[in-house]
Image (tube, rainbow, N blue to C red):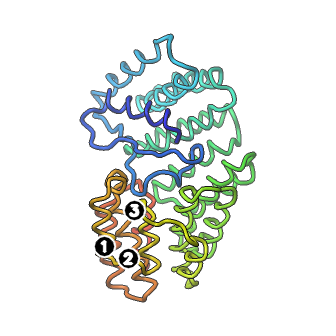
Amino acid sequence: MQPKIARILLAFAGLVLASCDAVAQRNAADSWDPSAREFGRLPIEPSLPADQRNNTLEALNKILASPKLSAFDRSIYLSIRAYQLNRLGRAADSQKDIAEMGKVLPAAWPLVLSGTVPELAGGGDRAAALRTLDSALQQKPGDSWLVIAQAQVYMQLADYPRAVALLNEALAGSTTPADRRTALYYRGHAHFNLGQYAEAAADFDATLEGRTSFKARLTPLLWRYAAQVRARRDARGQLAKDLGNENLDEWPAPIAKFLLGKLSGGELEVIAETDDNAKRGNGKCAAAFFMGMDALRRGDKNRAREQLLLTQARCPTVSELNWAASSELKRL
């Protein structure tokens, strides 16, 4: 997500969710690129008690009453209010906010909604999130960004077959390299969680197309490694080839360094616990998962099980890492 969006969401979280421990921590790389987020990031969690939801709505009403909001900022807050209105059972008012988003930001409003609603759904009210996205799709049927957002919410519900079907639809309707890469990235996760490892590896490989920076390429490369390990392919050799002579010191690159055998598990744990970037992105979560993948590559199922259980404990339940660990534990 772009830095401005992240700041808006963080400001909103601080305003109305001061008691929550988790706020969004999303980095900028490619616009709205989910793989640009820190591993193990926590979403906004708007899981307020019912008697506090009107207070949240009141705060949003005050923000949206300001004439100084830019069109982009207004669209962001409208998307959040549309979700909150659905939580309160006010579907008609929610639809009005979505319609207003279309007037305020005609070209990009589905992208905004796609970026906010799955994050907000992480608080637990996935039904409200799906209702919000359904309303949006009534206004713009088949929009790939909105369909991708639906798939993300279904993945939070562990309905991976439904997610694959939706992401196939999103790919068929994609109009830009960005929405195509994003759909491929999430379809790779859906395939992985279904145990369809060859398909997952292919999707993670395909989502590398058009990524020019090492930072933008690293997360798909690591996920492709995990899929190739489970597909019994030469995951380490392929990773080494694609990394070349890149500097592997900045988090999360030490994970790749560990996977290539250039760093011990203990050293990776120390970095995950002490590096500032790793701490901001819950580095211990990602470290545990990929140590589990390395154990599976070596055929050490007991060690893999230990690390995957640790991943579940360390990673938030809406994290792709938690999903993958849970799915793998069922297959061990």
35 versus 312 height, above or below: above
* Tag shown at residue 267: 1
Q: Is 265 displayed left or right of 74 in the figure? A: left
Q: Where in the figure is residue 255, as x and y percent of width and height?
A: 42, 69
Q: Is 133 displayed left or right of 251 in the figure? A: right
Q: Residues within 10 Å of mark 3 (few under 14, many from 20)?
A: many
Residue 231 found in image quarter: bottom right
Residue 294 found in image quarter: bottom left
The quarter of the picture where the C terminus appears is: bottom left
Name the secondary structure under disc 1: helix
Q: Is 305 displayed left or right of 109 in the figure? A: left
For the point 34% across and 70% down, which residue is it? 268
- The amino acid sitting under disc 3 is Asn
Name the secondary structure under disc 3: helix
The Cα atoms of the two marked residues, 3 and 1, are separated by 22 Å
Identify the residue position indicated by label 2 in the image.
263
For the point 28% across and 63% down, which residue is it? 313
- The amino acid sitting under disc 2 is Leu
* Tag shown at residue 275: none
Dot 3 and dot 2 residues touching (CB under 8 Å): no
Eye-nearest disc, 3 or 2: 2
The Cα atoms of the two marked residues, 2 and 1, are separated by 6 Å
* Tag shown at residue 322: 3
- The amino acid sitting under disc 1 is Glu
323 versus 63 height, above or below: below
Q: Nearer the viewer, residue 212 or 69?
A: 212
Residue 49 found in image quarter: top left
Dot 2 and dot 1 residues touching (CB under 8 Å): yes
Q: Earlier in the sequence, mark 3 or mark 1?
A: 1
Name the secondary structure under disc 2: loop
